[in-house]
Amino acid sequence: MADIQPLQLPGRLKQPRLYFDPQKMERLKESIAKHGVLEPILVRPGAKGTYEIISGERRWRSCCALEMELIPAIVRDMPDATALEAALIAHLLNEEITAIEQTESILSLLSLHLDIPVEDVKAGLYRVKNSRSRGAENSRIFSEDELKLIVEILGEFGMKLASFVSNRLPMLNLAPEILDAVREGKLSPTNAVLLNRQKSDLHGVLVEKAAGLTKQDLMELVKDLEKEQAANSEPVELSISEQIFARFKTVRKKKSLLESTEVRKRLTKIDQLLQEIEQLSV
């Protein structure tokens, strides 16, 4: 058992499984103690006589906790990309990883196949989606062969490039508290993105109350908390510059109003006054 370790990948690439639910681990440990390991783990040869786990890390961890000396295993010699893909597929089939872990693993898989850093993969995917939304070509971002490979890999996991960029990548930019909740399976990806848009001081209570809620229920919860917070807070008087800025933002939203000749004349006068004010501060 001492010569077995989790899957090791180059650089900052991440293996699929990062979070292990304590309750599920306890149940698995009890099952192994009673019935033994019923399915061998899958490993590949590692460095200095070690073996790296491709599939079955939960079983291995449980056996370690039970201080078992042996565990049944199948050894397969796999390169990094193949090992990561096999690990990811195994976890998906068993529904053992969160959407965050899946997204990070798919990025790592793309990084290995394209031979570029994960951050460059993310940036490239955003640029491809933006180019397509404008009807532009993306040949300067990825080659046709690279783009075909990306589409094929995403397709293996039932995803399309546009939805992966729109729905999955934003999850990696969640606030730490929300990101941890998704990793632990407490929040769905959709609810996490919605929650992340709220004020940071509401994140803690929302994470605590959002478990199991639908998107609609969560939106209602957000509204209730905002009303409660507004009722308990003292009104804040805006400075004259803040008032002007707030009014300007309101006017900008009324596009039909901005098309009026009279409105444009008045805005021109405002601009002239602002220029005079700028000169006063010189």
Image (cartoon, rainbow, N blue to C red):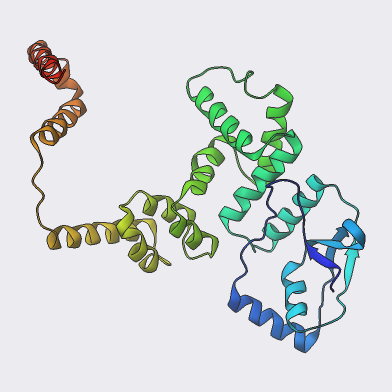
Residue 193 appears left or right of 135: left
From the viewer's perspective, is 75 left or right of 205? right
Dividing the picture into quadrants, the one containing residue 247 is top left
- State the image coordinates of residue 191 (x, y, percent, origin top left): 42, 55
- What percent of the width, then of the height, locates residue 19? 61, 65
The quadrant the N terminus occupies is bottom right
**Is 205 situated above or below 104?**
below
Quadrant for the C terminus, please.
top left
Judging depth in this view, the residue of 242 and 126 nearest the camera is 242
Measuring 54% from the left and 60% from the top, which residue is drawn there? 183
| Closer to us: 280 or 143 | 280
Horizontal and vertical percent for residue 133? 48, 25
Q: Residue at x 56, y 53 (%)?
A: 100
**Count of labels in the image:** 0
Outermost residue, bottom side: 34
Q: Is residue 52 above or below residue 190?
A: below
Eyeballing the image, is 216 above or below 66? above
